[in-house]
Amino acid sequence: MKNLLLILGIFILPITSIYSQCEINPDIQNNYEFDAKLLALRDILSDPSDPDHFNPYIPEARFTPYIEKLSAIYNNPNNDPEIDAIFNDFQIHANQEYNYPIELKTIAFNVDTNVPWVEDFKNTGISGVPALDQLILDYQFSLDNFWDLNGITIFFIKTEIEFLNLNAIIGEFENIQDFNSVEIYYDIIDLRFNYTGIPYQINGWGVEVADIIIDNDIFTFYLFSGDCFAGCMYSESWSVQVTEDCQVELLSNESNSISNFTIFPNPSSDIINISGITDEEFSIIIYNLQGQIVKSISSETNQINVTSLTSGVYFIKIQTEDDKTVIKRFIKK
């Protein structure tokens, strides 16, 4: 299992820039510190030579730059409504399981059932084996469950520490003499479904999964839908570049978006004008904040009549024949 973590890490793109300090927003500090630690741990696990690769705890200096950069995006100096939607409406967070599985809580080990201390450990959570009991004490583990299978007992121990780099300590458990095997126990499929934003659909499927992926100074915020138990079929994303001096720019995703698409006026009480679409045919879908489709048009027009909509916040999605899409947030007065 340790090797699996290292293999997974190879595919994680680390942050290589040395960031200057950006002002930390209290909302991001309170609501995105776990995300920042997770993003930092992805970075750390991607490189076996990283100085913190075998550090059980994530140093503050490793995750603070992520809080700073997320704060810079959240502060949204250009007042991009799409950036506001990332945090306020979609509430996109890093995913612990979907793209880069990282287990933070549970270690499993198995021993022969007839080993003398097994029954005591089942009953009390104390084995009498000094090395094991000390590790359990040091890292705040407790016995979570056990299985007896054909002369083998599998124990599952779970830490009370909120964020622990299990990859860093698995070797200490492997050195205990009576153990047949030790592994980080991945039973975290429920963590895949981390989307908590407004109800929203992609290609007719409700969004269930969100994630934040970083490539150097570009933060990409993802939404996923479409049978996410098997592997999500559909996604939408927004990419934001944060420079070393904390400047923020919302980037267009040329592979699946319409880069020059704009709507105006916004807010509007009657007519919304569309510009930036050169395709002859495209579809228009308008969603309310509950993710319900309130208007759907197959059209060549550059205007949308929103007179019939009640006042409030909506999302307009434009999709062309070649599957380029863009979403804009607008307010109906």
Image (cartoon, rainbow, N blue to C red):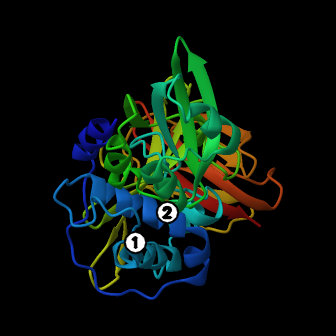
4 left or right of 16?
right
- What count of labels does the image hold? 2
In three-dimensional space, the C-alpha distance between marks 2 and 1, rounded to whole angstroms, equals 23 Å
Q: Which residue is mark 2?
A: 138
In-front residue for pair 235/166: 166
Is there a contact, CB below 8 Å, between mark 2 and mark 1? Answer: no
Mark 2 / mark 1, whichever is N-terminal? 1
Residue shown at 61% from the left, 30% from the top: 146
Query: Which residue is tagged 1?
Result: 63
Q: Say above or below: 112 vs 209.
A: above
Q: Give the position of the C terminus as an image quadrant.
A: bottom right
Please name the amino acid that badge 1 sits on.
Phe
Q: Residues within 10 Å of mark 2 (few under 14, many from 20)?
A: few
Camera-side residue of 263 and 314: 314
Is residue 249 placed above or below 300 in the rendered structure?
below
Q: Residue at x 55, y 56 (%)?
A: 92
Image position of 255 (left or right of 58): left
Q: Position of residue 204 (x, y in %)?
A: 62, 29
Q: Is residue 118 placed above or below 71 in the rendered structure?
A: above
Give the x, y percent position of residue 180.
Answer: 38, 28
Classify residue 73 by image quadrant.
bottom left
- The quarter of the picture where the N terminus appears is top left
Residue at 39% across, 39% down: 324
For this orientation, the residue located farthest to the left is 49
Is 68 situated above or below 13? below
Indicate the position of residue 122 as horizontal and vertical percent values.
65, 35
Secondary structure category for the residue under label 2: helix
